Amino acid sequence: MSWTNDDDADAGWVGRLGRLLGTRPDDRAAAPAIPPALPGDPPDIGLLGAAISGMPDPVVVLDQDGRVIAFNAQASAIAPALRRGEPASIALRMPELVEAIRAANLTGRAQRIEFSARLPSPRWSETFVAPVALAGGKPGQTGVVVITVHDLTPIRQVEEMRADFVANVSHELRTPLAALTGFIETLQGPAREDPAARERFLGIMQAQAWRMARLIDDLLSLSRIELRAHQRPDTPVDLIPIVRQVADGLQTLARDREVTLEITAPAEPLMVPGDRDELIRLFENLIENGLKYGASGKRVDIALAPLEASGEALVSVRDYGPGIAAEHLPRLTERFYRADVGESRAQGGTGLGLALVKHILNRHHGRLTIESKEGEGATFTVRLPMRGNKIPLR
């Protein structure tokens, strides 16, 4: 639920609470009213508890003196010290919240505050403190105060991810664009009459243009895959010809790097439900990475096999290059994350290859494992459920 300002905050959770309790609005504040309690008794705790128990957000109801009348399980989870009949300030040890409760009682207007916590993990929340008039109460008299807490963490995380994504894309595009601009200015000026410089600069400009084109292509592919993330492919495909096709297409790169590609596969088809084009893209990224970053090992081994016990098809790509340090392994599938930024850019990498692999596998209900030791190469293993199966959780 979204709230736009404090003036209409009463129309949200508090309004819903009033409707659940069958109350009428107070003429002065247009706030929902709660049926009056019996003489000398607090408001109906059972009715309040039933009304707020079904709300997804934490809700606490206080009397005029700031004592707890009722709260739901979600509120108890974030403030275990809440007790009926005790001052809320004991359990809600937050000066801003205590001040908001006081202001709501004094002014009769809803208050809103935001707060964050960094431990054990970053969390952001907004709290609304709204006075609710009792039915039959005197004009201007506040009956109870309703506190609702809304978790902003998913929204803030998406905002941070978006900001990081835009910053990363801008940075990745700015570098080749700056190179192109600089070389164009050089060719228009000092190197105008220098054929040798012109040929050298045009080659560099072409490489930078290709780099931008690959980045845009990867971004578009990632976007298309994410749009279909919840649509699992169901077309039966054989992984063996897909992997052989990819390996054949990369033979030129293998020869240029003086790397031998070896494929070990069963004689029988290895059928999985999948999207052929996406699986080709997946194995292109894995095998090309092995040829580029493991070229010093002079060999890349690709093994395919069925795992009958778990109903999975396994495809592993192993190189014998320098390997990857352990601290990098958990983050390799993050967008734009690189274990070695300089080496990745020198190889023409966009920083999105393994992110694409991860998203393709998510759509296919598969998984990727990475094993590596520095100096001993790296093994990327793909596990895909064979037709009619799901990969078991481990």
Image: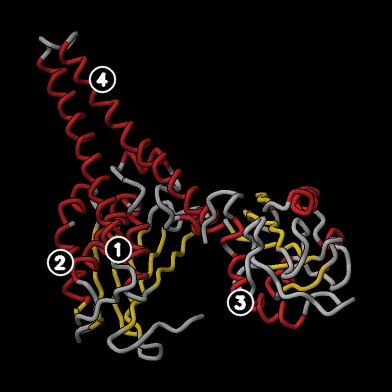
The answer to which of marks 4 and 1 sits earlier in the sequence is 4
Question: Contact (CB < 8 A) between labels 4 and 2?
Answer: no
Question: Contact (CB < 8 A) between labels 4 and 1?
Answer: no
The residue indicated by pointer 2 is 245
Residue mark closest to the camera, 4 vs 1 = 1
The residue indicated by pointer 3 is 20
Q: Residues within 10 Å of mark 3 (few under 14, many from 20)?
A: some
The answer to which of marks 1 and 3 sits earlier in the sequence is 3
Drawn side of residue 244 relative to residue 151, left or right: left
Which type of secondary structure does the marked residue at label 2 adopt? helix
Q: Residues within 10 Å of mark 4 (few under 14, many from 20)?
A: some
The residue indicated by pointer 4 is 182
Please provide percent x and percent y for residue 255: 18, 51
The answer to which of marks 3 and 2 sits earlier in the sequence is 3
The answer to which of marks 4 and 2 sits earlier in the sequence is 4
Q: In 3D space, how far apart are the residues under numbered discs 4 and 2 (Cα atoms)?
A: 39 Å
Q: Residues within 10 Å of mark 1 (few under 14, many from 20)?
A: few
Which type of secondary structure does the marked residue at label 3 adopt? helix
Q: Amino acid at mark 4?
A: Gly
Which type of secondary structure does the marked residue at label 1 adopt? helix
Q: Amino acid at mark 3?
A: Leu
Residue at 68% in and 51% down: 111
Please provide percent x and percent y for residue 295: 31, 51
Question: Contact (CB < 8 A) between labels 1 and 2?
Answer: no
In the foreground, 355 or 57? 57
